Image (cartoon, helix red, strand yellow):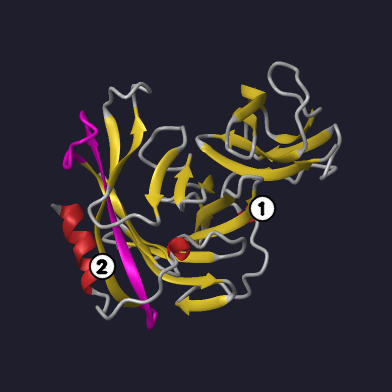
Amino acid sequence: MKLINLLNLLLILLIIIPTYGQDNSDYFPYKKNNYWEYLWLETGYPDTIVSLSVFDSVDNEGQKIAIFDSYFINPIKPPVMLPDSGIYIIDSSLNVFTNAEPIGYQEYALIYKLNGIQGEQWVMYDYSHSGNGPFEIARIKEISDATLFGIKTKLMWIDYFYAPDSTDTTGLGRGGDVLAKGFGLQARQREGWPGIGLRGAVIDGVLYGDTTTVGVNEPTSQNHPLSFELYQNYPNPFNPVTVITFSLSSGGNISLIVYDLLGNEVIRLIDNIYYQSGKYEKSWNSNDTDGELLSSGIYFYRLSFNNHSITKSMILIK
């Protein structure tokens, strides 16, 4: 009941007005350098959560790829409710897939259908991988007209729940997201956590609402709040060898994994191995786990340390 009341409160705070526009792609404005700040509701916590797009591209099939980083800003430290770093894929039907959904699984899940209609639901994730469930399910509860930061918009309310049957319309509540056309994620609630609400944003260079950052031009993962850093590979573009550099301020187990453009794992360059504090280099000769050389394209490399991660992109050209 608390989850529903919180999201209803966020809706009441908006002024309901006539609808506008037909293109739904701007429910998820993924372009590099777009920037959002969120209030962490019901906690009295004075800080805001920053989310920013650090990379965008389009693959040969027309799928859009984006990487978002997030963190608390005062002081800089890991976020809540948003992934510290995650990859998003938007297909030609405006379905949004990510490996960064905070429910807990680590595979790609269909979290948004930007062209979806009110009442539509779909399976985000099948734990059996065979159609037998149980399932994580998404359902568009409501699409409504509203005003946000003085701009006419639409809100898409998406509920998430766990159920043993994919046709169930109710189940164990996981919370929900609210998307706003032209602005992206406007509010989020997850089971057992306070919610977040959008305070301000910079979308395509235009400032909306209130943000605490001035001069957002080239945000990068090097502003990340964690006790480790991941640097841009060199050379980049490369053929066939490149070097990945990272530094740790304390010792711990790390993993360094390369992914292809669709988020499929290519190779584990470091697999949960203990490293002492210091600066390290790891070379990669553009081969996969089986030793086969990869084709030209965009690849991602992700460094994970103490349950957090940073992701960067690199380009292989032959």
Residue at 47% from the left image edge and 43% from the top image edge: 98
Q: In which quadrant will I find the C terminus? A: top right
* 293 drawn magenta: no
Q: Picture quarter containing residue 152?
A: bottom left
The circle on residue 214 is none
Name the residue type under label 1. Answer: Gln
Mark sitting earlier along the chain (1/2): 2
| Secondary-structure class at tag 1 | helix
Picture coordinates of residue 18 (x, y %)? Answer: 28, 80
| Residue drawn at 81 percent across, 35 percent down | 243
Q: Position of residue 153 (x, y in %)?
A: 36, 74
Q: Which residues are magenta?
A: 148-172
Left or right: residue 119 versus residue 100 is left
Q: Which mark is residue 10?
A: 2
What residue did someone put label 1 on? 222
Q: Is residue 173 visible?
A: yes
Residue 29 in the image: state x and y as whole percent. 51, 63
Name the foreground residue: 217 vs 253. 217
Mark 2, other Cα within 10 Å: few <14 / some 14–19 / many ≥20: some
| Circle 2: residue type | Leu
